[in-house]
Amino acid sequence: MVKPVLFILGVSALPLAVRLKSELDAEIHTPDCVAGGDVTYPKASAHLASLFRESRTIIGLCAAGILIRAIGPQLKDKHSEPPVIALAEDGSSAVPLLGGHHGANDLARKIATICEGHAAITTASEVRFGTSFDVPPEGYSLANPQHMKSATAAKLAGEDVRVEFTERVTAGSETHIVYHPKTLVIGIGCERNAPAAEVIALVSQTLEAGNLAPASIAAIASIDLKSDEHAIHAAAKHFQVPARFFTAEELRKKSPRLKNPSMLVEREVGTPGVSEAAALAAAGPQSELIVEKTKSLRATCAIARSPAPLLEIPGRPRGIVHVVGIGPGTPEWRAPAARSALEASSDWVGYGLYLDLAGDLKVDQIEHRFPLGGEEDRVRHAIELAKDGRQVSLICSGDAGIYAMAALLYEVIDLEPCRIAVNVIPGISAFQAASAKAGAMIGHDFCCISLSDLLTPWDAIERRVRAAAEGDFVISFYNPRSLKRRDQLERAFAVLAAHRPADTPVVIASNLGRPDEQVKIVRFADFDPDNVDMLTLVMVGSSQSRTLTRGDGMVYAYTPRGYAKKREAAE
């Protein structure tokens, strides 16, 4: 769940923001000049607009007009806008400005209770009736939102408005509000690699034949052998519902309730039915089969009904491992996709330092800490968690695919196939951060070479160093030294010495993006390997790389692309 934002403009609002942070499980956004928050911003209006576009819940501890002016140009669709609340700095008034029926009114009431203030609810129907037609009970959805405004006006005028709860397709009207309960489960069985369009069409036709509303679908269910079946997940996405999976043993327990058991299916997968059994299993012990197994060319479909809306769906989702590159460590360099995966995951797996670097996003995730080394242990542990239907973040520093865990994860899955999903999320790698901090060292062709010979023979590493030296690449050396590996860096520089001028810039970058960050630029001839440890990246320029001293005395390094020659040719 994405945290709501407590937005402040100055230090005077910080005490109340700190007080509300834990109560609301929120994060504090402050201007660059104010310390003590979780995220800083340079310009208030641009930051507010960005948060709104990202559908973040905003609680602005500031004047309502500031929020209105910043967010006003972003307004498009009232049905999708996130909650926006203006809160007085003393907590005396909480005013829902937007998203009243999407949680803003309830959140304002909660804030008012915490602050012993007043929630200024202005939604007419809530003020008068305590509820609104577009806020259905949990487990229900509004079937005819186009009539909500007219029905509300009629209700406020004292007219009779009929409210109906039904799984059947019903049009409704300006005086007839229809809610669909989430009580139906679609059970699906299909051949391997069945077309998604066929499965979606089968479900749609089955619903239509029974006059059943797609909005009443609570889930799609199948056997765990199909947890990686594209067609089933495509159907779940099409109907905007979760997919749940069951073992053959769990489905076999539903055998007495099946209408169309099959000996052939039992021989193939270990249970006499998939679609009917899965629908019944996911709809719960009190469910009934309302549509028996229906067939298409390569798929089957059945529908079960729960006696009450399904707020929690039995079965397991398809587990996923997010291989998350968090960048060098600072939150400002962390990709939004990485943040989303970390927040959505139930489990974090990784080296303890990397888990600590993501700690600002931790709420109730279970941490699985591993020491430095043992990378395969981490990968296998993440896979086992995902096999149990969990959503897992395997956390890497830098980029997940550069000397990190993504390749190892795929290697293990290649050796031992499993049905989990994998999502590799890139991050800013150390060589990119080092180049940026030093200037623009990778402005032309470059390469990365790991000097660790734990998995790669030194002869192979030396050949690569020599080839990069002769090819005149800018070279980033990863894993330059460790407690046990002391001389590889010196040996690499000995190879480079014949190909690099003495004044070639060398960048020594340690703890990038962290409080003790250090970035130095030295001449090739002056490089001292004793200044390097396991948290350091060493970047050696090409023969064309050069340094630049600016007016403030700061030295930068860059590798020209060749535009000078282009300018000379033009002249």
Image (tube, grey):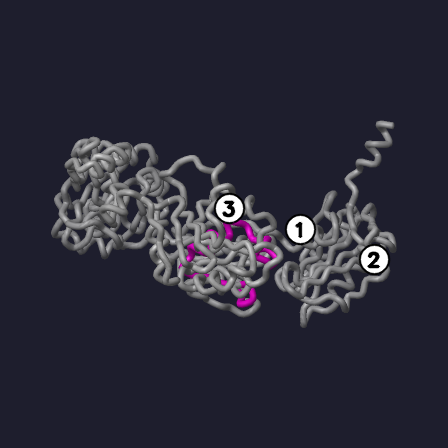
Is any atom of residue 218 visible in this view? no
Corner quadrant of residue 150: top left
Could you classify mark 2 by the number of other residues whose Cα lies within 10 Å: few (under 14), some (14-19), or many (20 or more)? many
Please give the residue where the numbered disc 1 appears in the rendered image: 432
Disc 3/disc 2 C-alpha distance (Å): 54 Å
Q: How far separated are the C-alphas under marks 3 and 1? A: 37 Å
Q: Residue at x 50, y 64 (%)?
A: 15
Above or below — where is 540 with respect to 381? Answer: above
Q: Nearer the viewer, mark 3 or mark 1?
A: 3
Count residues near mark 1 (Cα–Cα under 10 Å), then give few for <14, some for 14-19, many for 20+. some
| Magenta region | 327-354
Q: Nearer the viewer, residue 334 or 533?
A: 334
As shown in the figure, which amino acid type bears the numbered disc 3? Ile
389 left or right, relative to 367: left
- Which label lies toward us, 3 or 2? 3
In the picture of the structure, the residue carrying the numbered disc 3 is 66
Q: Residue at x 53, y 59 (%)?
A: 38
Kindly report which numbered mark, 1 or 2, lies closer to the viewer in this rendering.
1
Q: Is residue 71 magenta?
A: no
76 vs 498, left or right, is: left
So how many labels did they put on this image?
A: 3
Q: Residues within 10 Å of mark 3 (few under 14, many from 20)?
A: some
Q: Label 1, label 2: how many angstroms apart (C-alpha)?
A: 20 Å
Q: Which mark is residue 524?
A: 2
Q: Earlier in the sequence, mark 3 or mark 1?
A: 3
Secondary element under disc 3, as helix, strand or loop, is helix
